[in-house]
Amino acid sequence: MHLSFVALQGSLSSFTSHHIHLLHPLHPLHGF
């Protein structure tokens, strides 16, 4: 279960990090 979450985070990290940086630099997901 943990691996599934990590894999998802890695995939989203690249996609979300870009958007979060522009939308919310202090987003809760950014720290994750």
Image: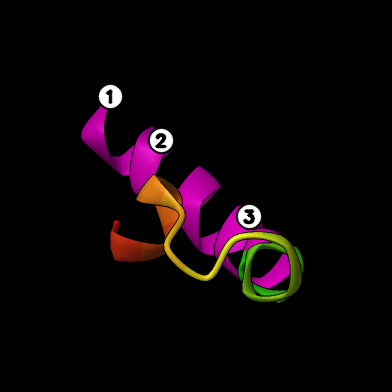
Q: Position of residue 5 (x, y in %)?
A: 38, 37
Which quadrant: the N terminus? Answer: top left
Rendered image: mark on residue 12: 3
Q: Secondary structure at mark 2?
A: helix
Does the stretch in magenta take in 32? Answer: no
Q: Where is 21 relative to 12, above or below? A: below
Q: Residue 32 is drawn in which quadrant?
A: bottom left
Amino acid type, residue under disc 2 in the picture: Ser
Q: Where is 4 relative to 22, above or below? A: above
Looking at the image, is mark 1 or mark 3 nearer the viewer? Answer: 3
Q: Please give the residue where the numbered disc 2 appears in the rendered image.
A: 4
Rendered image: mark on residue 1: 1
Amino acid type, residue under disc 1 in the picture: Met
Q: Nearer the viewer, residue 2 or 31?
A: 31
Amino acid type, residue under disc 3 in the picture: Leu
Q: Secondary structure at mark 1?
A: loop
Cα–Cα span, label 1 and label 3: 17 Å
